[in-house]
Image (cartoon, rainbow, N blue to C red):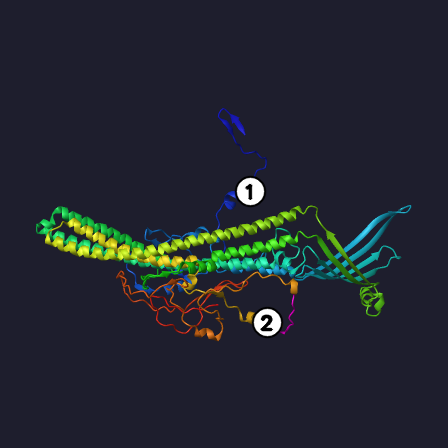
Amino acid sequence: MLCGQFGCQPQQPLFLTERGRWQNHYISKATKIEYPDTDVCSLPEVSQAAPPLTLSNPDPTAMWDLTLEESVQMALKNSKVIRTLNGVGFSKAGASGAPGSLLQAPGGVSTVYDPALIESNPNYGIEAALSAFDGTLNATSTWNKTDDPAWNGRTIGTTGDTGNFGIGISKYTATGAQFQIYNGNRYNVGGNSNAPSSWTSYIQGTFRQPLLQGNGIQFNRIAGPNGQIGSYGGVAIARLNTDTSLNDFEMATRNLVADVEKAYWNLYYAYHRLESVRSGRDAAYQTWLQTKTHSDVGSRAGRSQYLAQAEHNYFTFRQQTEVAQSNLFTAENALRYIIGLTATDGRLIRPVDNPITAPIKLDWNSIVCEALLRSPELRKQKWVIKQRELELTASKNFLLPRLDLEGGYTFSGAGKDLLDPEDRRSNAYGSLTTGDYQGWTLGLSASMPFGWRRELAGVRNAQLNVAKAKAVLQEQELELTHQLADSFRTIDLAYQQMQTTLAGRRSATDEVNAVAAAFQAGTITLDQLLDAQRRQAEAETDYYSSVVDYNLAIMTLHYRKGSLLEYDNVCLTEGSWPAKAYFDAKRRARERDAAHYMNYGLTRPRVVSRGTYQQFQNGDQYDYNSPAADELPMPMPMNNPKPGVEIPPAPTLAPKVLETGSSSSPVIPIPVPVLQSSGMNKPVSFIQPEVPSAPALTPARNMRYIQK
């Protein structure tokens, strides 16, 4: 550090033998950006993507007529990673960019592997918790040599060789007891002739059973053997973690289905928005041509003022048409993204399902009851409450004194050799097997802290956690009822707006016809005609916007009350296992069937779960692997909300679509997918069971379904 007139400046130190090897390494190697050595194949949807459709490249190779049912099926089939729109794509406010959540935060997305990852976690998974009760093999082998000095008038050395060898097995039981059996062998060689070599062998069995603290199946299922206060990692807690992960996966799947519906109906709106502004553009162009004709012949209707107004009106509609065309491509790309297709394959997706336009009847009480029962958010919080209650039960066990019953039994033997087949009594194992040398021990050990300060704090903390979890559940239920009330108002408003905009659409059409006739008669000016044409285009757009709002409001109601997956006939079930797994499961079931039933009585743990959650409320649960699965009844139409929501058949609403390219689309057979939950060490998968052919699809979205 040199200090002068202008302050201090840092200086590098000086070395006598500086060779520059290390600094060259850091400059040329350590600061370089390197590329990882990985080998992951790209998806065909990535490598075979065609150039995107734009205003400069607007013509698709074909039009692809796609139903909402097929869109949901594709999304489930192509979703190992659960995608989300998060405002991506096109909405009625306009285009909103491209997806980016996976690139920015890949660690926070949900995948089909998540439930299996939680279940197979080596720290807090189910198998990790069960491993605490597995037997453990322990083995030791040590050699010791001693050469110690001693004094008896002169310095002499005392030498000796010893060896210890042993092997044993220890295991914890569900009641907290620890059993151990151990075989030890000790070898000893003295340093003089009066102390010959000898072997000692013994087999020892010991046990330690907690009588108060740490005792019981319930405690050991929650905290595990040797559990500590405030740290619970038993089988019951691990199982709750798995159930919570399945609940999270269900919510992620529900969000995916909701995004598919949003993208589908937004694309539907984009087509009608384009058709509305294009009709206005064509009408404005015809008006401009007529005004230009009048201007060419010198008519009063062709004054320069009228001509400029008509031309400006035409370019305004043309600009709106270009924006609507680009927004349509953006909306179509958003639908492709959420269902897992390539960005562009030359075809342009065109929705063919008609939205609901009929009124629905809502029953508030039944919908609230159903939402309180089926909401996955409430069900997840109830799992949290159950976990906190189990932790409270375990924490109370630590208020008991530590009192353990200990005991053991030992068989011993000694001899000159470890094994000697010719002389049984001169070897250690021979002497051991005679049973002449036995011993046993039995006793109690106890410990108890003064004040129980840490234990009482643990119980109080567990009680506060239970109170907090229950208070959160109550507030969640209150928030859910507010959301349902908002959905009620939104559905009613959307329907009223749909009726109002429909009437406005008819009025705007009548106004254009009347104003056009009056303009031809010369009784009104051109600007009045242009304003009428503009209002007609806006009324057309507003009507289809209200139709989409109405359908999205119905979807949102199902989303909030937890019936969206049933509404779209999506069922979560476990994926198929290898054939060997089914063979082993059958073998274990036969073993349990042949065993004798044991009533555990008071040691039987309390109930944690109420059984399997019934995903479909209007049907009987059944085994989808049974032969009867091919004789499934047809469910209610998907557009009919379940309990509390009644929808009459929707009238036919002929959509107006953009006529570009061929109207035909290739036939793409897509069987009904069944969304599957995870098994142990196995990702969630989407299977396609064989079902008999279903009747033709209708706008009501009839689907066959498989229920667990």
In the picture of the structure, the residue carrying the numbered disc 1 is 22
Residue that appears at 15% across and 50% down: 526
Residue 166, percent across and down? Answer: 75, 60
Name the residue nearer the viewer: 295 or 244: 244
Magenta span of residues: 593-600
Q: Is residue 184 above or below residue 584?
A: above
Precedes in sequence: disc 1 or disc 2: 1
Amino acid type, mark 1 = Trp
Q: Is residue 4 above or below residue 431?
A: above
Residue 37, percent across and down? Answer: 50, 55
Find the residue positioned furthest to the top. Answer: 5
Disc sitting over residue 631 in the figure: none
Name the residue nearer the viewer: 644 or 459: 644
Kindly report the distance in space between the C-alpha atoms of the residues bearing marks 1 and 2.
66 Å
Q: Based on the displayed image, in which of its 4 quarters is residue 542 positioned?
A: bottom left
Q: Is residue 2 above or below residue 187?
A: above
Residue 493, percent across and down? Answer: 33, 54
Amino acid type, mark 2 = Ala
Name the residue nearer the viewer: 355 or 430: 355
Q: Is residue 108 above or below residue 601?
A: above
In the picture of the structure, the residue carrying the numbered disc 2 is 589
* Residue 597 among magenta residues: yes
234 sits left or right of 628 in the view: right
Residue 619, percent across and down? Answer: 45, 68
Label 2 element class: helix
330 sits left or right of 111 in the view: left
* Residue 429 among magenta residues: no
* Quarter placement of the N terminus: top right
Depth check, mark 1 against mark 2: the one in front is 2
Label 1 element class: helix
